[in-house]
Image (tube, rainbow, N blue to C red):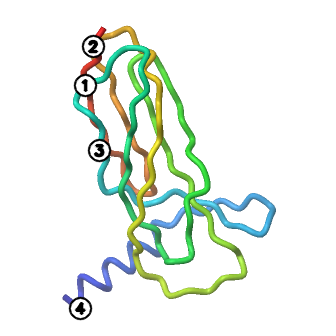
Amino acid sequence: MKYEFLISLLILTLGCKIVEQGDEFIYGKIYIHSIVVDDSVKFGETFTVKIYGSFPTPGWEIFKHEINETENEIEITPIARIRKDIYVIQILTPCSTSVDIVCKTKSDSLKIVAVGRTSKIEKTIRVVK
């Protein structure tokens, strides 16, 4: 158990890719654990993608979502932020967010990709016309 904690701490320290934007916040991706979306959606209708993950510390909050859409794929990257002047203990803190998306693809399937700090999670759903 002690070694697992030390390995987790090492991964968190080395895996943190933080981007500064010149204001009082530090920005970065969250750790992605899972995504939840319906198995099928109708063309032209709005559907919700729920993303579950963790912040590296309790001081982080969801800031925005970067969304890249192609014909058969939607890539969602949740971006979080923390104030530069906050000091908190480094412990993984559960978080979740959701995104409403309009189905624009004309193909039979759509791949949803959630991009995190250290991993990507994909789910393919069926498109009903």
Number of the front mark, 1 or 4: 1
Q: Secondary structure at mark 1?
A: strand
- Quadrant location of residue 93? bottom left
Q: Give the amino acid at mark 3.
A: Val
Q: Secondary structure at mark 4?
A: helix
Q: Give the amino acid at mark 1.
A: Ser
The Cα–Cα distance between marks 2 and 3, rounded to whole angstroms, is: 18 Å
Q: Give the amino acid at mark 2.
A: Val
The residue nearer to you, when weighing 39 against 11, is 39
The Cα–Cα distance between marks 4 and 3, rounded to whole angstroms, is: 32 Å
Q: Position of residue 125 (x, y in %)?
A: 26, 27
Q: Position of residue 24 (x, y in %)?
A: 77, 69
Figure quadrant of the N terminus = bottom left
Image side of residue 104 versus residue 62, left or right: left
Q: Which residue is mark 2?
A: 128
Sequence order check, earlier mark of 4 and 3: 4
The Cα–Cα distance between marks 1 and 3, rounded to whole angstroms, is: 12 Å
Sequence order check, earlier mark of 4 and 2: 4
Which residue, as the protein is rendered here, is positioned at the far bottom? 2
Query: Residue at (29%, 17%) from the top-left corner?
Result: 127
Q: Give the amino acid at mark 4.
A: Lys
Q: Which residue is mark 4?
A: 2
Query: Residue at (26%, 29%) from the top-left corner?
Result: 124
The Cα–Cα distance between marks 4 and 2, rounded to whole angstroms, is: 50 Å
